[in-house]
């Protein structure tokens, strides 16, 4: 088995220099990549003799601040799971639950979420808690599954002749994914006829390239207090993938062309994602040289990350919706828009994950997530373990009458119209308009 020690020393040297050089840290965050920080944490490298897992694991990590001084220990491990367990135990001593190692399968799912692309059929599936059955949550629009007639609520019975009893959603998703141009055969119960034999059908679905857009949107017709009918652009951002900023820009251009005069940006239950994506989305709404976020390195130095000659796509009034599921990059974006006076925040206090992490892929396809910095809002408010408190809580007490049913898209009426946060957001937009405070 080859030695990993020399490679690890080199990585530790370069990583320590990256972290100590504050300018490089900020530049790396702005570019969307944060250098691996070995100086304050365990540095692990798994050595493999492909295709089989080697019988021992070499782990090297800094013994002091001097990059050339490392401690090396050989662990007699015979499986990848044992290696992950050993490394997880080492990382747990750091007291940071977000510094962790994840398996190749978990990292693949993470990359699909951040890249926004996969090869498969375009189904979102989950286990129904009451029955334990695998059901279709939704189909990606114009995906192979949608074209094959698979619908929300359909129950998956078999994949390529294999029964799915007791199989979780991730395992089933892996069976559905595959190289574009191949196909997969699924047996489903129609959602309308579950429990009836006549509702069972077998469908052959060709796999293709699936683009997972993190954005959905609609126009909400809105009548102002003085009786005028206007259009509010509603944008739901579900994750900060590599395509989030480009998709957001295209969406805003489309809504502007459709006559939107105000906006609701929904970040509820958005767990975050790529820091760069959060910063790029913020710049779509802001002008000038505003501070987007402040990074705090391990020495406690606070370093602002600023825009450079920014030009917002729209200056129409904006409300941002947040809740306890809004975390990480969602909090960066909400803080940037709020502290720079661009948006009112409506909802509930956010999750409070104010850490910036590096992601290092290891030789076997697993990945090491390491916290390298934390961030503060532009107004220097601490977010980590604190969260962001919105300007207005989600309550309809301030509204004198129920919102009139005005949505053209009937499938959206029930969910959006009954949403008290959206009702309050529209009220706040009316207040902004009445005060003439459009950003």
Image (spheres, grey):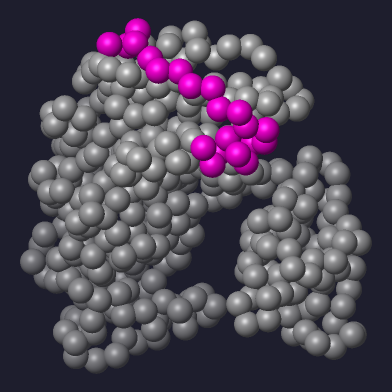
Q: Position of residue 395 (x, y in %)?
A: 23, 81
Q: Position of residue 159 (x, y in %)?
A: 84, 60
The answer to whether residue 354 is left or right of residue 196 is left
Residue with the most extreme bottom position = 401
Q: Nearer the viewer, residue 351 or 413?
A: 351
- The quarter of the displayed image where residue 372 is located: top left
Residue 83 magenta-highlighted: yes
Q: Against 422, is 336 above or below? A: above
Q: In which quarter of the image is the N terminus?
A: top right
Residue at 21 percent across and 46 percent down: it is 336
Q: Against 346, is 197 above or below? A: below
Residue at 74 percent across and 22 percent down: it is 50
Q: Against 42, is 235 above or below? A: below
Q: Position of residue 165 (x, y in %)?
A: 78, 70
Q: Nearer the viewer, residue 349 or 401?
A: 349
Is residue 306 something that shows in the picture?
Answer: no
Q: Against 416, is 310 above or below? A: above
Residue at 79 percent across and 48 percent down: it is 207
- The quarter of the displayed image where residue 245 is located: top left
- The quarter of the displayed image where residue 168 is located: bottom right
Q: How many marks?
A: 0
Residue at 23 percent across and 49 percent down: it is 384
The answer to whether residue 325 is left or right of residue 148 is left
The answer to whether residue 74 is left or right of residue 72 is right
From which residue to which does the magenta span run? Answer: 66-86
Residue 18 magenta-highlighted: no
Is residue 411 something that shows in the picture?
Answer: yes
Q: Where is residue 206 in the image (x, y as percent from the top left)?
A: 83, 51
The answer to whether residue 277 is left or right of residue 40 is right
């Amino acid at each position: 088995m080859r030695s990993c020690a020399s490679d690890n020393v080199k990585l530790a040297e370069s990583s320590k220099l990256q972290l100590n050089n504050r300018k490089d840290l900020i530049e790396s965050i702005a570019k969307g990549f944060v250098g691996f920080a070995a100086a304050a944490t365990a540095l692990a490298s798994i050595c493999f003799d492909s295709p089989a897992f080697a019988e021992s694991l070499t782990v090297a990590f800094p013994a002091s601040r001097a990059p050339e001084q490392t401690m090396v220990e050989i662990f007699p491990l015979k499986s990848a799971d044992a290696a992950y367990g050993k490394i997880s135990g080492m990382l747990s001593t750091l007291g940071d639950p977000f510094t962790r190692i994840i398996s190749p399968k978990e990292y693949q799912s993470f990359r699909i979420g951040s890249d926004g692309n996969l090869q498969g059929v375009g189904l979102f599936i989950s286990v129904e808690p009451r029955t334990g059955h695998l059901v279709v949550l939704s189909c990606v629009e114009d995906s192979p599954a949608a074209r094959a007639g698979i619908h929300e609520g359909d129950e998956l019975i078999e994949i390529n002749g294999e029964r799915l009893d007791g199989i979780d959603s991730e395992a089933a998703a892996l069976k559905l994914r595959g190289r574009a141009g191949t196909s997969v055969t699924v047996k489903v119960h129609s959602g309308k006829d579950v429990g009836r034999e006549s509702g069972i059908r077998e469908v052959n679905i060709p796999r293709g390239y699936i683009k997972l857009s993190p954005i959905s949107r609609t126009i909400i017709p809105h009548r102002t207090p003085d009786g005028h009918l206007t259009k509010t652009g509603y944008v739901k951002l579900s994750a900060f993938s590599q395509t989030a900023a480009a998709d957001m820009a295209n969406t805003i251009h489309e809504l502007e062309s459709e006559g939107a005069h105000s906006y609701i940006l929904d970040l509820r239950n958005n767990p975050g994602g790529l820091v760069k994506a959060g910063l790029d989305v913020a710049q779509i709404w802001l002008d000038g040289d505003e501070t987007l976020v402040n990074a705090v390195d391990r020495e406690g130095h606070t370093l602002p990350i600023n825009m450079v000659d920014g030009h917002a796509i729209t200056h129409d009034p904006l409300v941002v919706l947040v809740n306890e599921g809004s975390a990480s990059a969602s909090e960066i974006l909400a803080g940037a828009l709020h502290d720079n006076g661009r948006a009112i925040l409506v909802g509930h206090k956010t999750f409070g994950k104010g850490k910036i992490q590096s992601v290092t892929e290891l030789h076997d396809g697993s990945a090491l997530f390491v916290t390298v910095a934390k961030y503060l809002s532009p107004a220097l408010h601490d977010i980590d373990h604190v969260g962001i408190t919105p300007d207005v809580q989600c309550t309809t007490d301030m509204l004198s009458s129920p919102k009139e049913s005005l949505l053209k898209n009937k499938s959206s009426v029930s969910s959006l119209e009954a949403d008290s946060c959206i009702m309050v957001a529209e009220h706040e937009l009316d207040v902004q308009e009445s005060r003439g405070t459009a950003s």
